[in-house]
Amino acid sequence: YGGTAALLNSVAWVESSAWDGRYALVVCGDIAVYAPGPARPTGGGGAVAMLVGPDAPLVMAGPRATHAFEVYDFYKPRGDTEYATVDGKLSQDAYLASVDTCWSRLKAKLGAPAAAEQLGLNGSPADLRAFDYVCMHSPYNKLVQKGFARLLYGDFADDATAPRFAGDAQRWAGVPPAKTVGDREAEKCFVGLAKPDFEAKCAPSDTASRQVGNCYTAALYMNLLSLVSAKASSLIGARLLLFSYGSGAVATAFTLIGREPSGGSALALPPASPFTLERIATTAQLAERLTARTCSDLPTLTRALELREERYGQAGYEPSGDVGALAPGTYYLAAVDELHRRTYSRK
């Protein structure tokens, strides 16, 4: 959630009387590694940088809803290992319950005329149909599918008599969302019911996360970049629903709207073109960069993680890992001295 906290703080600064005209740069990234076991295949790593300022091609609009509560679903109580202590079932339930709460609160806020006007709802229902695309925090893709289905269940809880909910869904008519978290039959029903909307609204954002794996605080914004890369200028005028989650736990739902910049920002000065959605997609070259990665096998990953385990917390050493596969310009750890001071080199 740290990336979202930085983004919201940066937006608040740009909107405030303290803003001095400069851009804010938000960089969120992490490495998700797990001890041997079922969670290890979900691991990954990545970073996303976001520039915050005026005349942006994506605008944070309307209200946002946050939910925070104490839960020991994923935490690091030990100083001798980087591996987290994870309660998988509890973490999944905390994620889904956070989707429920944030979605319910956001829709309640969108019921206010001023908020609805900001998003251009024009009398349309403030439900999942009001959003063109959805980006969600993605520990693994199956959980994203379940989380998306919770959005639909929230709409069902508000209006179970709607024709789109005819059939098997009526078994849960009148049942509050909180009572169905962990209900496998309800999950199966609503994941199936939500599938067409998921494919249209959410799947376009999962390109990177399905190939990279979880990267914690960067995961949501990796998905946003995937969506921009896939849709580019077609996002102009589109409403994007974003859901951010961090274990422990805190979550926020908020909205972005795509727009065509006027070209009046510093980023459009000659010889640069306006900072458009198309320019982001072209510059990022996401598909090409994913394809250009070096493919390694499972034993290679295991050896790399064993080396990380061996070196974790140590001082007075130079890393022995191979840097040959690193892309040109990559910074890498060159040494850690006896006082734990780190030195980096660039390839």
Image (cartoon, rainbow, N blue to C red):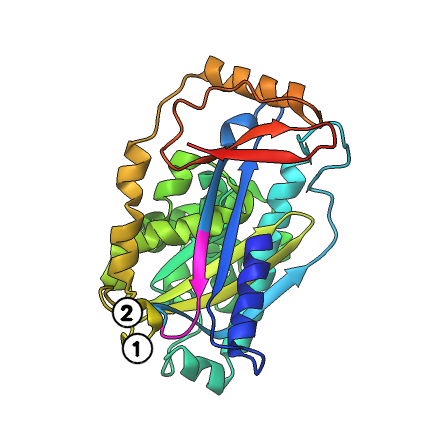
Label 1 and label 2: CA atoms lie apart by 7 Å
Amino acid residing under circle 1:
Gly
- SS at badge 2: helix
Residue 138: x and y in percent read 49, 45
The answer to whether residue 297 is above or below residue 201 is above
Res. 264 mark? 1
Q: Quadrant of residue 279?
A: bottom left
Please name the residue shown 66% across and 18% down the image: 310
- From the viewer's perspective, tell me whether residue 85 is left or right of residue 59: right
The answer to whether residue 168 is above or below residue 81 is below
Res. 294 mark? none
User: What is the quadrant of the C terminus in the image?
Assistant: top left
Q: Is residue 118 magenta?
A: no
Please name the residue shown 40% across and 54% down the image: 224
- From the viewer's perspective, tell me whether residue 60 is left or right of residue 247: left
Please name the residue shown 60% across and 17% down the image: 306
**Pointer 1 with pointer 2, Cβ within 8 A:** yes
Residue 60: x and y in percent read 45, 70
The answer to whether residue 40 is above or below residue 300 is below
The magenta span reads 49-55
Please name the residue shown 57% across and 25% down the image: 38
Identify the residue position indicated by label 2 in the image: 268
Q: Quadrant of residue 231?
A: bottom left
